[in-house]
């Protein structure tokens, strides 16, 4: 429930969210409960007992994969510690990101942590990011300035990537307190700095939006399946200048491309693109080690309430196979609809008894099947 509560608190204005997100950065009018997201204990666990990538940032310079000794010295010198993609190492944040994935129509969600101990240094200089993001202040205070963008819809690889904000007034100048959340729109230049003596701890929960570039990249990949788009150049030596046969060759290519693009309607192309995304996207989620799972959930009774432990796309449940993070299991045929129900209702818990009644399966068999899914980490029992 904690993860669902956290995700919902970010999207309290869910119906308006997509409209607001495209209009610009904004401070969420209602704060969130920080303990639903992250704690100092969890930070210490991640730093010391997980394989998370630990980077150091100081006034625009950066050290990747820092050693523990280096981290301690750098923090004392005012560097910011960045932990990348904690959703891969924190079961709770995996659930929060997974819930957001479902609530935001299958968007890919990643989460970084920033610990900034000093108000004298910044981690990054003014810059923009290529993802939309929620800045969730957990502890301490951080001042954010956000400027009007000068580059339209930036993506990762562009020839011109610098937005000079010097001499311009920020549109937003706000100090986040624990529980405050700033939504930062992709591309909006920003600068963040710890305020006061207390270290600032915040999460950046990034929403990777699908862009027109993603669709075009996919289309280019699709052309590789079409014979005429794999033709060789008609000449072997590249002489200087352009002759008529080369122009003819290029015209044919452009013509073939137009013809190929208009061979399908916009909705057919969209459908194919969505199928491609469903088949290739990484879904954040929770993976429990089998030993831990069996120890925690040894007994499954008809009254046990089952919930999916990480959201999966229904497309990932094929007729007899359930695909999950790093795992794939063959499903006994009678249990296919039951597994499909679980995957299609990622936020909902259902009792084993209800599942057995709904699918007319003996309750003992359903208990056994759920125990197998628990062992594999696909489901958990709601406590
Ligand atoms: Fe940033």
Image (spheres, rainbow, N blue to C red):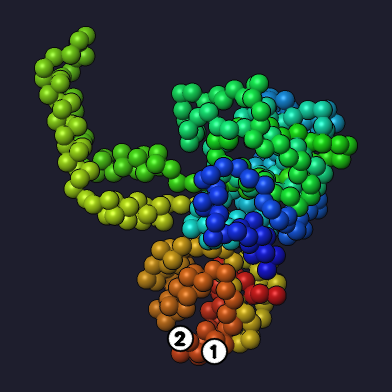
Q: Position of residue 111 (x, y in %)?
A: 63, 47
**In the drawing, what numbered circle is on residue 319?**
none
Tell me the quarter of the image containing the N terminus: bottom right
Say which residue appears at 45% left-offset and 46% top-offset.
Answer: 210
Q: Secondary structure at mark 2?
A: loop
Q: Secondary structure at mark 1?
A: helix
- Number of dots carrying numbers: 2
How far, Cα to Cα, is label 1 from label 2?
Answer: 10 Å
In the image, is the residue at mark 2 within 8 Å of ligand 1 by its beta carbon? no
State the residue in front, 265 or 72: 265
Say which residue appears at 73% left-offset and 60% top-offset.
Answer: 36
Q: Residues within 10 Å of mark 2 (few under 14, many from 20)?
A: some
Say which residue appears at 27% left-offset and 54% top-offset.
Answer: 268
Q: Residue 293 occupies which quadrant of the picture?
A: bottom right
Q: Residues within 10 Å of mark 1 (few under 14, many from 20)?
A: some
Residue that badge 1 annotates: 363
Tell me the quarter of the image containing the C terminus: bottom right
Horizontal relation, residue 272 to residue 176: left or right: left
Q: Residue 307 occupies which quadrant of the picture?
A: bottom right
Say which residue appears at 63% left-offset and 60% top-offset.
Answer: 12
Q: Position of residue 198 (x, y in %)?
A: 87, 40
In the image, is the residue at mark 1 within 8 Å of ligand 1 by its beta carbon? no
Q: Position of residue 29 (x, y in %)?
A: 69, 53
State the residue in front, 225 or 259: 259
Residue that badge 2 annotates: 359
Q: Position of residue 253 (x, y in %)?
A: 18, 31
State the residue in front, 375 or 43: 43
Horizontal relation, residue 183 to residue 261: left or right: right
């Amino acid at each position: 429930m904690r993860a669902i509560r956290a995700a919902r608190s970010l999207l309290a204005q869910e119906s308006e969210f997509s409209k607001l997100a495209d209009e610009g950065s904004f401070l969420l009018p209602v704060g969130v409960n920080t303990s639903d997201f992250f704690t100092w204990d969890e930070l210490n666990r991640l730093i010391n007992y997980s394989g998370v990538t630990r980077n150091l940032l100081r006034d625009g310079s950066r050290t990747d994969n820092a050693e523990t000794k280096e981290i301690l010295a750098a923090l004392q010198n005012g560097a910011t510690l960045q932990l990348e993609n904690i959703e891969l190492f924190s079961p709770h944040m995996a659930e929060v990101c997974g819930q957001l994935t479902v609530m935001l129509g299958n968007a890919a969600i990643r989460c970084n942590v920033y610990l900034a101990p000093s108000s004298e240094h910044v981690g990054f200089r003014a810059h923009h990011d290529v993802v939309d993001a929620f800045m969730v202040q957990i502890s301490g205070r951080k001042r954010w300035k956000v400027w009007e963008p000068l580059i339209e819809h930036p993506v990762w690889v562009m020839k011109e990537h610098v937005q000079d904000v010097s001499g311009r007034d920020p549109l937003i100048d706000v100090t986040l307190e624990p529980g405050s959340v700033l939504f930062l729109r992709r591309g909006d230049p920003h600068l963040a700095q710890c305020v006061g003596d207390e270290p600032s701890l915040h999460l950046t929960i990034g929403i990777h939006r699908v862009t027109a570039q993603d669709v075009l990249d996919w289309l280019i990949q699709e052309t590789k399946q079409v014979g005429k788009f794999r033709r060789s150049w008609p000449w072997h030596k590249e002489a200087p200048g352009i002759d008529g046969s080369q122009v003819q060759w290029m015209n044919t290519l452009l013509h073939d491309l137009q013809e190929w693009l208009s061979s399908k309607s916009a909705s057919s192309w969209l459908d194919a693109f969505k199928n491609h995304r469903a088949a290739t996207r990484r879904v954040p989620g929770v993976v429990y080690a089998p030993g831990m799972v069996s120890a925690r959930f040894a007994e499954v009774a008809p009254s046990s309430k089952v919930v999916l432990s990480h959201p999966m796309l229904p497309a990932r449940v094929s007729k007899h196979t359930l695909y999950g993070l790093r795992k794939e299991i063959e499903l006994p045929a009678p249990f296919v609809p039951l597994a499909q129900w679980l995957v299609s209702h990622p936020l909902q818990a259902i009792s084993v008894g209800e599942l057995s009644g709904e699918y007319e399966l003996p309750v003992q068999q359903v208990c056994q099947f759920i125990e197998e899914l628990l062992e594999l980490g696909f489901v958990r029992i709601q406590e």
